[in-house]
Amino acid sequence: MVTEAGEPRPFPSSPDPDLRRLLSPRSVVVVGATDRAGSYAAQTLLNLRRSGFTGALAGVHPRQEDVLGVACRPDLAGALDLIGAPADAVVVATTAATVPDYLAEAGRLGCGGAVVFAGGFAETGDLAAEQRLVAASGRFGLPTLGPDTGGLVSSHARAPLWRDPVTLPGPDEPDTGIALITESSAVGRRVLAHRGGTGLHTVISLGNGAVVDTAHALTDLATTAGIRAIALYLEQVPPGARLASALAVCADAGVRLAVLRTGRRTGDGSVLDALLREAGAVPCADVHQLIETTRALARGRRSRRPVAVMTTCTSDAALAEDLAAGAGVELAALQTTTRLKLRSHLPGTVTPSSPLNHTTRLHADALDTVTAAVAADPGVGTVVYVQDEPAVPPPGIHGDIDVLVVAAMPGQEPAGAVSGLPSALAALAQLREPPPDATRLARIARTARVAASSAPTLPTSVRPGRRHLFPPEHTMKAVLDTAGIDVLRHAVVPVPPSGCDPAAVATAVALAAAQIGFPVTLRLSSPGAPPDLGPTGSTGPTGLTSLTNGDRVGRRVAGLLREADALDIESRCDAALLIETQARPGVPLTMTAHREGVVPALTVGLGGPWAQVPGSTRTVPLPADPERVTLAAASLPGTATADLAAAGRAGHRLGELLVEGHFAHLRITLTDGTAVSAQARRQPWP
């Protein structure tokens, strides 16, 4: 989570709180135990009883020794004596003012973690109360969910530590290894109610995320046995370096991700989206799609080969074909040998094809045989069976055929099936891609940490001002040239003090222009912010007049010196007249290295009049190797004639300069592989 100022709230004593005991509790203490109907404490006790929790359970109540059949003591130490050891999980269901003391005591006594239901902290504007909670948790390194959390549900441990009514699936129900991390307790409640929580392994509601945030939870769940896919519901922007590290852990463990995030209208989330794409996270549009896509990710297998669809009706076959095309999923063309095998088992009116509509006339006994034949086709990677009629037993449920069963209509799902074809196809589209690169994600995290820790330095005698934060373009051209980025052939004539002879300056500029070779362009280069230095803004040397001889250069110099007279003294000191050879025509590409997202990134876009074309930008988290930048540029419309290899090299070096040179922003416009403009903003000094 981030504060209102945008700064991360780190876990005070450890960057990686150990959630293992909290996620699989074998002993629980409920602080504030009561039998009052509707209270969070009473509901938690009822949930545990109803779900068949077999671990040790005790409560804390100031007067009663028994609440809802659970033994209680007046303090936490006494409750721990009842269970004979420090509790794996302490549920704090008391008022906000009492929470810090209970957390400090739980940590001192060696408990595994805490769940805090109470609100009245940062979500209501009381930052001081939340800081007290964080300090109490950090005193002894107690992992804490909340405050204002819906709770934690560990289905495999039969431990629903949740403030609302929860009914877990029976212990014999299949656990498909899916988990949910949510920043909204309402989303958690909805997912737990959806299909009776079938297939859920763990649900974590973060609440305010004051101690345990998305990155912490993601890291621990990714290394938890039995979890194959995780659904993420994000409302805030997690700290970038830790999020990238957590995503690297997921990639290394082979844990797949689906994500639903809100807040898209309140800021530019392109960098967060790009980071999640690098992690292979499937974007979802609503909560139903989020959890069902996660289910499909957990059940599906990664394969580059096309998908075969089977169903019982023409409409489902036609719909599957259209949806697959929209999702980018290639449907298999069954080989001749496969079609011949199928003819001997299918009804005579059915033509073997993909999608395969075997109709309701197919006898149930022949269904596994037909499915096995389709699955054995060398050109088929995954078989998707669209379950249209619940009365027909889906293949592979009782056999050994690997099939992804999809319910065509929500509410008609067989056990283990995915609800909805769009969710299944979104997952399969991702599973056709190469797995995410854990090493690449770790490098993104490392770059983000280096960028965050590096701070510019100046001699104490220098007062940082506008001239230092916004270096002039001629200075930046020199930086680019030194870094190996091609720039226009150019010369620089410093702006003289006021009152100097303009003719002498014009002569110097004309000589420089002649050495460069006419035609040239000429402009005033001075410190100061360009008109738009956002990651998708459009700047560049537009509207420059081509000067073809010394006389025209002289007239232009006179006008630029009048502009220089309007500069303040500080800016004039670094101002110069920048003479450049005229740029060759070509498709302008903008490259912007910046720190405005969750991690440092490079935004590649079209420049000039093409800047307003829809889909005209691509974002690559740093570090951006040349090949990755080249691919991003090549995916832009109209770049077939651009020097993409040069763009790749330039973007790579620009990203390195951002971090190495302590810049907040670096932007260049490339034409034919050469930087024709350059703007920058340095990081502010502390």
Image (tube, rainbow, N blue to C red):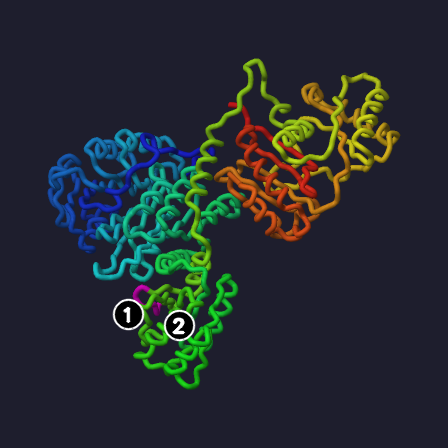
- Select label 1 or label 2 by which is in front: 2
Q: Secondary structure at mark 1?
A: loop
- Residue at the right extreme? 551
Tell how many labels: 2
Depth check, front residue: 191 or 318:
318
Quadrant of the rendered image containing residue 682: top right
Q: In terms of secondary structure, where does tag 2 sit? A: helix
Locate residue 657, reporting x and y percent. 57, 32
Classify 20 as above or below 508: below
Dominant secondary structure, magenta: loop
Q: Which residue is mark 1?
A: 399
Residue 473: x and y in percent read 68, 30
Q: Please state which of residues 422 and 193 is positioned toward the viewer in this rendering.
A: 422
Q: Is residue 260 visible?
A: no
State yes or no: residue 384 in magenta: no
Query: Does any portion of residue 342 appear in the rendered image?
Result: yes
Residue 469 falls in image quadrant: top right
> Which range of residues does the magenta coloring cover?
411-416
Observer-nearest residue: 102 or 481? 481
Left or right: 399 as drawn, with respect to 443: left
Q: Position of residue 203 (x, y in %)?
A: 31, 50
> What residue occupies the far top of the structure in this picture?
461
- Amino acid type of the residue tagged 1 in the rendering: Gly
In this view, the residue farthest toward the front is 337
Question: What's the residue at 33%, 79% (across, down)?
Answer: 366
Identify the amino acid type marked 2: Val
Residue named by callout 2: 374
